[in-house]
Image: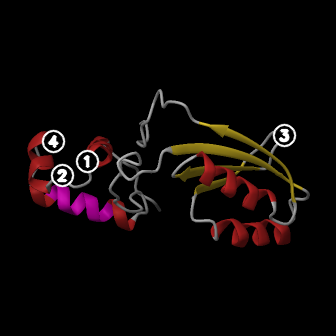
Amino acid sequence: MEKKLDRLDISILKLLQEDSSRPHKQMAGILNVSSTTICDRIRRLKQGGYIVTSVAVLNRRKLKQEVLAFIHLKLSHCSDEIINTFKDDISAIKEVCECSTITGLYNIKLKIITTDNTSFSGVQRNIANIKNVQALESYVVLDNIINDIGFNF
């Protein structure tokens, strides 16, 4: 049986979302517990699947990745075979950062990050040419109003 998260677990998860490189000793001081407790809890949260990985959030503009866009796609059918083939095809396009199945008029939502509009246009053409893509609609992000990757508890 899976153990329920307590307040300390949730506090640790919040701190890790803010800065996963924060030393355990510093977290222990903030939460008024021992470093050993923090270490044990983080290990248990990882083993329980609550923490999938720790990553650095990069500044895409500093890396000359100026265009952030979303593309909504409609596939001709949503059979397992077509979805699996689509997954293989879309995974080969390095500018695709996220791919989700969605409800509504479209079946798929893609997040694209690329250098400029010319590059984005090429990516869009490549995606439109994938077998079973029936329709495509693009949305280029002008500005992020909320840019938080954290989970709200």
> Secondary structure of the magenta portion, mostly?
helix
Q: Secondary structure at mark 3?
A: loop
> Circle 3 sits on which residue?
105
- Say which label, 4 or 3, has the lower sequence index: 4
Residue visible at 8% across and 44% down in the picture: 29
* Horizontal side of residue 32 vs 132, given as left or right: left
> Circle 2 sits on which residue?
22
Are circles 1 and 2 on residues that touch, CB within 8 Å?
yes
- Say which label, 4 or 2, has the lower sequence index: 2
The amino acid marked with disc number 2 is: Arg
Part of the protein shown in magenta? 37-44
Is 43 in the magenta?
Answer: yes
| Label tally | 4
Structural crowding at the residue carrying mark 4, measured as other residues with C-alpha within 10 Å and reported as few (<14), some (14–19) or many (≥20): some
Spatial separation of the CA atoms under disc 3 and disc 2: 43 Å
> Circle 1 sits on which residue?
19
Q: Is residue 58 above or below residue 129?
A: above
